[in-house]
Image: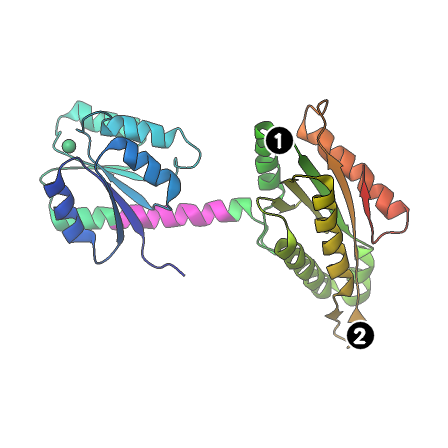
Amino acid sequence: MKTKSTILIVDDIDTNIDILLELLGEKYDVLVAVDGKTALDIANKEKIDLILLDIMMPEMDGYEVCERLKSSEETHNIPVLFITAKTDEDSIEKAYDIGGSDYITKPFKPRELLARIKTQLQLRKLINNLDFIATHDEMTGIYNRRQFFHLAIKRFKETKKNLYAVMIDIDKFKEVNDKYGHSIGDEVIKIVTKTIADSILKDTIFGRIGGEEFALICNAESKAIVMKNIESMREKIEKLEVKAHNGEIVKFTISEGISKAKVKTKKLDELLKEADIALYEAKGSGRNRVIFR
Ligand SMILES: [Mg+2]
């Protein structure tokens, strides 16, 4: 588990970088960029918690770097603290207008800078926690319904080619809850979630979209690969067991419906609808099976 926050320093002057490295190097993981382009590359590749950004740099200035960071979904959440020799009000106002979180002028007071960095990192942590709560299912830790749809729609727009949707439902789940109680029902949901999460293909979007209902969106080279993958989940899950409070062994299964995006598929909803129909077919034809549509 990573405990140190990572700070990216962006400045075109070596001595400025050295001063900041001296100040921050022990407490934080520090990365350095000497120009805007490199800064953007690093911000996109690494997990950065805070950027200390100089304004006056050749080629791309700090304002432009900040604007680009704020306009990209990957980097817009990273707080930017401007450290600059510019002290006029227009410059300061502009820094905040384009999304800067804080502003400090050079030469800075070291302890003041450290305090401001600490504040920004604390805020960032709070926002991250809130983001996680808003996008993940509390019980299972996987994406919640809203985030699943958000990411799935994005994926659909980006790459419809070889895109598959899978709808998954735990068979006769209500009976488990009624017979053994909700805590055992929750156990079943958790172990099913974990089994699926451990089995999914790379870059699969996996979410809990209802009580005992899950959905997957993935890209794969062939239908055979996806079928084998989701068939293996079904097989693993039918072998699982959970112990009820009365000592009884609880067994459970899942049904899965799968569909593939076609040229004529215009919206994600259509793809999911097809998978849902396939899921109902799987339920109707005896459960614990996979149906492709
Ligand atoms: Mg400079």
Task: Identify the residue shown where x is 70% and y is 45%.
Answer: 225
Task: Identify the residue shown where x is 78% and y is 34%.
Answer: 274
Asked whether, in this view, residue 45 is left or right of residue 35, the answer is: right
Task: Identify the residue shown where x is 74% and y is 65%.
Answer: 240
Query: Which residue is at the far bottom?
Result: 247
Q: Is residue 123 magenta?
A: yes
Amino acid of disc 1: Phe
Task: Identify the residue shown where x is 60% and y is 30%.
Answer: 159
Task: Answer few, some or many: residues within 10 Å of disc 1's Cα (few below 14, many 20 plus, some between 14 and 19).
Answer: many
Q: Which residue bears the numbered disc 1?
A: 156
Specify the quarter for ligand 1: top left
Q: Residue 146 at x, y = what percent?
A: 60, 39
Q: Which residue bears the numbered disc 2?
A: 248
**Majority SS type along the magenta span:** helix
Q: CA distance from mark 2 to mark 1?
A: 44 Å
Q: Residue 75 at x, y = what percent?
A: 39, 37
Asked whether, in this view, residue 268 is left or right of residue 278, the answer is: left
Tell me which segment is drawn in magenta.
118-132
